[in-house]
Amino acid sequence: MKYCSHCGSGLDFRIPAGDTLPRHVCDACGTIHYLNPKLVVGAIAEWNDRILLCRRAIEPRHGYWTLPAGFMENRESTADAAVRETLEEACARISIGEIFTLINVPHISQVHVVYRARLLDLDFAPGEESLEVALFAEEEIPWDRIAFRTISLTLQHYFADRRAGCFGFHTCDLGPPPTGADPFSQTGKPSASPRG
């Protein structure tokens, strides 16, 4: 940030009084601008033994498959965000269930939350950000074409829980990929053991 969104003056980057971290501070009007992590929210939309995936029409990872998910908007709940993103990306209506995964991605200041959900009907189609939308059985998942490590990890937990006959809540911290590796590589492992 270079300029204050309240008064337009230049900003200083320093630790404000009473704080412990550097912030963008406007010395003209006194506003402290906080930059906080972003929430990415999505859903595993289930139909019998299949789940809904979208093939991305936008970067990053154009052409790769993902669960319907995206950034949470102001003034909505995480559940509302999952429902909205599924409608926007897959034109699909869902009944929201419980939170299934919560994955911290601190190196990019994001938290990814995925709900289990039930697809209400088969009336789905690609939204503006999707090239195509399809239902996949476990053996049909295009593992080498999954867009993001958080989605791959969520799908692994989902199918493992389904085989075990009991769905749990899974959380972990996902570290950065090795230096020089594809930042979206599916070979990356959580930096800490899952806590659920």
Image (cartoon, rainbow, N blue to C red):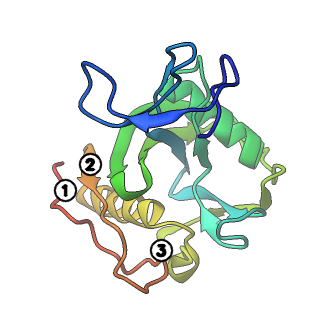
Q: CA distance from mark 1 to mark 3?
A: 20 Å
The crowding category of the residue bearing disc 3, from other C-alpha atoms within 10 Å (few below 14, some 14 to 19, many at least 20), is few
Is any atom of residue 106 visible in this view? yes
Above or below for 58 versus 124: below
The answer to whether residue 175 is above or below residue 25 is: below
Quarter of the rendering containing residue 91: top right
Q: Which three-letter amino acid code belongs to the residue tagged 3? A: Pro
Element at badge 2? strand
Report, in whole angstroms, how far the alpha carbon at label 2 lies from the one at label 3: 22 Å
Residue 181: image quadrant is bottom left
Q: Which mark is residue 170?
A: 2
Label 2 packing within 10 angstroms: few (<14), some (14-19), many (20+): some
Q: Which residue is mark 1?
A: 194
Mark 2 or mark 3: whose residue is earlier in sequence? 2
Q: Give residue 139's position: percent from left, percent from top.
A: 49, 76
User: What amino acid is found at the position of numbered circle 1 in the picture?
Assistant: Pro
Image position, residue 109 (x, y; %): 42, 48
- Say which element carries label 3: loop
Relative placement, left or right, of 185 versus 168 is right
Task: Give, as a three-letter code, the residue at label 2.
Answer: His
**Are discs 1 and 2 less than 8 Å apart at CB?**
yes
